[in-house]
Amino acid sequence: MYGKCGAFGSANALFRQMSELRDEVSWNALLTGLARVGRSEQALSFFEGMQLEAKPSKYTLATLLAGCANVPALGLGKATHGFLIRNGYDVDDVLRGAMVDMYSKCRCFDYAIKVFEEAAATRDLMLWNSMIRGCYRNGRSKEVFELFMAMEDEGVKPDHVTFLGILRACIREGHVELGFQYFSSMSTKYFVLPQVEHYDCMVELYCKYGCLRQLEEFLLLMPFDPPVQMLTRINDASKKYGWRKLGEWAAKRLHE
């Protein structure tokens, strides 16, 4: 509780009083709490202390890597990766995915690629999705499409997270028609039901590149009322590109 509230002075004092009662759960809570708020040096110090009392589980290490990704804290992330290697942990796709995500968010993408390639024989959907997210986060959106084809070649079926990454890559690269093809294939070819986030990506794609006629047609396919964020984007794009009728429609919906 103290860790989640950011009261690490109280958390630290309580933790030290638990000297004979400390277990993996308490270590995990303290380490991830420190990593989450960016206190990576302190987390690294406690991580070293933990190794004297107990062997961290893979769950603890994966959670710590996730905390490093969110800060981001590259130094602590690398230390955790090194600890895994030195101590002979069985690095499964959950850990690899956490490492890929951490290195990607820390803008150390070459390391993410290396981790991904080391798992060539055992890559699951979670790991592929981590790599796809890493590509568009690091300005390498073109590689997303190559990854998707390679993923299919390995017989891994995409999910809604995969397509969210692909559509964001289409936005980055300006692939309007390709974006619609991928969106359409979700339900027709891969039996993945598009969610609000996927519709929002398509609206952003059409608005960003001024394809408002296609946007009007796309809105007719939408099985729900556009939320405020979507309507605002449509209204702004209509003003920018002089698409008066669509803009009036969006403005009216915004004021209902």
Image: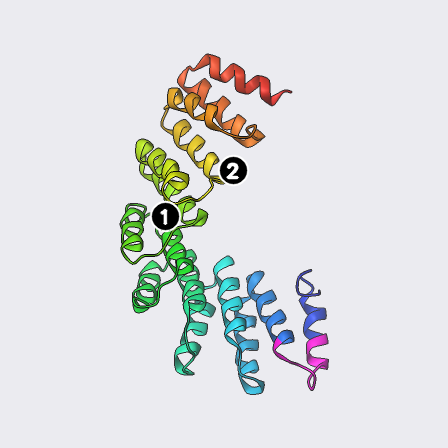
Q: Quadrant of residue 210?
A: top left
Depth check: give the residue in front, 149 or 207.
Answer: 149
Report helix, strand or loop for mark 2: helix
Range of residues picked out in magenta: 14-24
Q: Quadrant of residue 16?
A: bottom right
* Residue 141 position within the rendered picture, expressed as x and y whole percent measured from the top left: 32, 46
- Foreground mark, 1 or 2, reads 2
* Residue 127 position within the rendered picture, expressed as x and y whole percent measured from the top left: 39, 60
- Could you tell me the amino acid type at mark 1? Tyr
Q: Is residue 20 above or below residue 145?
A: below
On-image quarter of the C terminus: top right
Q: Is residue 88 left or right of residue 248?
A: left
Depth check: give the residue in front, 146 or 7.
Answer: 146
Does the magenta run of residues contain 109? no
Q: Residue at x 40, y 21 (%)?
A: 212
Residue at label 2? 196
On-image quarter of the N terminus: bottom right
